[in-house]
Image: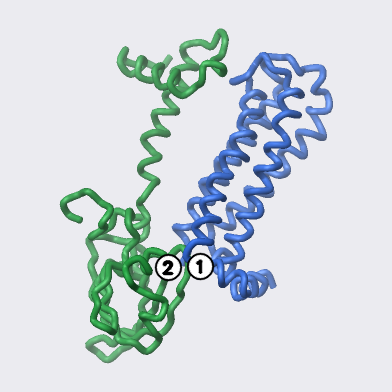
Chain colours: A green, B blue
Amino acid sequence: MIYLSNNTGEFMETLYHLAIPEAFVLEGINMKTKLAIGGFLAIALLIVPLLAHHSFSAEFDGTKPIHLQGVVTRIEWANPHVYFYIDVTGADDKVENWGCETAGPGGLLRRGWKRDSLKVGDHVTVNGYRAKDGSRLADARHITLPDGRRIFGGTPGDGGPGDPAAKSPGA
Amino acid sequence: MLREFCQWLYDSTIGTSIRESIWVFPIIETIHVLGITLLIGTIAILDLRLLGLVLRREEVSRLASQILPLTWAGFGVMFVSGFLLFWAEAAKCYANPAFRIKLLLLILVGLNPLVFHLTIYRSVLSWNEQLVTPLRARLAGFFSLTLWGGIVCAGRAIAYFQK
């Protein structure tokens, strides 16, 4: 027997009746099954928002900002995310190639970042956040293009720092 | 061999233009997501009937014959839109663990109805009206729902392993 408080049980039963159309409601279904289905729906409702719109925190770490300056070596103008790669020269003169992820072509174009706004050999400045797996990959939140424009590079609604679609004051 | 094929698809004119498009890629993506409702929605109706959870007064064979054309239509939409998305991202999909798991699950989910139709479904007329269907039919319904659920999850996860 599963012990459920009256309120929880009622909530799950209500969920069950909300979710299952009248025509599908089973004859002679017992309360335990109703509660089980309702419980499953409750868990599903909790999980779905966690899965949606977390492409930033799924890959990148909002507590690890990074500032990169370098020369563009490659551009992947592609859906669903545009990537560009830059050679960054460190203090010890060692060159490291960094991948920078941005929004897709549609999102960038709406912000005035055209396909030819960035070319191989261009010098760019990127302010972003490092990938969680520690690889040389960053979510490029702000990019200073060769013409001096500073453009938001993130995906709207990804919940990352500076996301214009987020409602939080930290945005 | 397979990797070269994926790279060739990726570099092809059509693959490249879908990948670099502004509208075509998201439109195909949207169709692929909407298609889930047609494909898995109709499959779920039959699976849940086999499990004895919905439409228990309907004969299984009648339900199946009405629903199957819709399921095939959904499969067509999913296959075409899915292949176009793969075409655009083939070289990245090749190395993507989520994509590999998805393909594996797709093979398994294809075997399930094959076994079902070749075995227990042959005698459907003898259990057509049963509220609770034979164990093997219920198992087929259960595996179908579980595998399709896994395929949707693996499909969604592709985006998180695409580098």
Label 1 sits on a secondary structure element that is loop
Q: Given the image, what chain letter belongs to the residue carrying mark 1? A: B
Q: In this picture, is A60 found above or below A114?
A: above
Label 2 sits on a secondary structure element that is helix
Residue B16 x, y percent position in the rendering: 56, 72
Q: Residue at x 56, y 39 (%)?
A: B37
Amino acid at pointer 1? Ser
Outermost residue on the left side: it is A169
Q: In this picture, is A32 found above or below B105?
A: above
Left or right of A36, for residue B37: right
Q: Residue at x 16, y 51 (%)?
A: A169
Amino acid at pointer 2? Pro
In front of the other: B156 or A76: A76
> Residue A101's image quarter?
bottom left
Q: Residue at x 65, y 43 (%)?
A: B74
> Residue B39's image quarter?
top right
Left or right of A2, for residue B38: right
Residue A28 x, y percent position in the rendering: 56, 8
In front of the other: B138 or B14: B14
> Which residue bears the numbered disc 2?
A105
- The numbered dot on residue B21 is 1
Measure how far apart labels 2 and 1 are at the Cα level.
7 Å
Residue B85 x, y percent position in the rendering: 57, 60
> Residue A43's image quarter?
top left
Q: Given the image, what chain letter belongs to the residue carrying mark 2? A: A
Residue A112 x, y percent position in the rendering: 33, 71
Determine crowd level at label 1: few under 14, some 14-19, many 20+ residues with C-alpha closer than 10 A. some
Determine whether label 2 and label 1 are within 8 Å by CB: yes
Determine crowd level at label 2: few under 14, some 14-19, many 20+ residues with C-alpha closer than 10 A. many
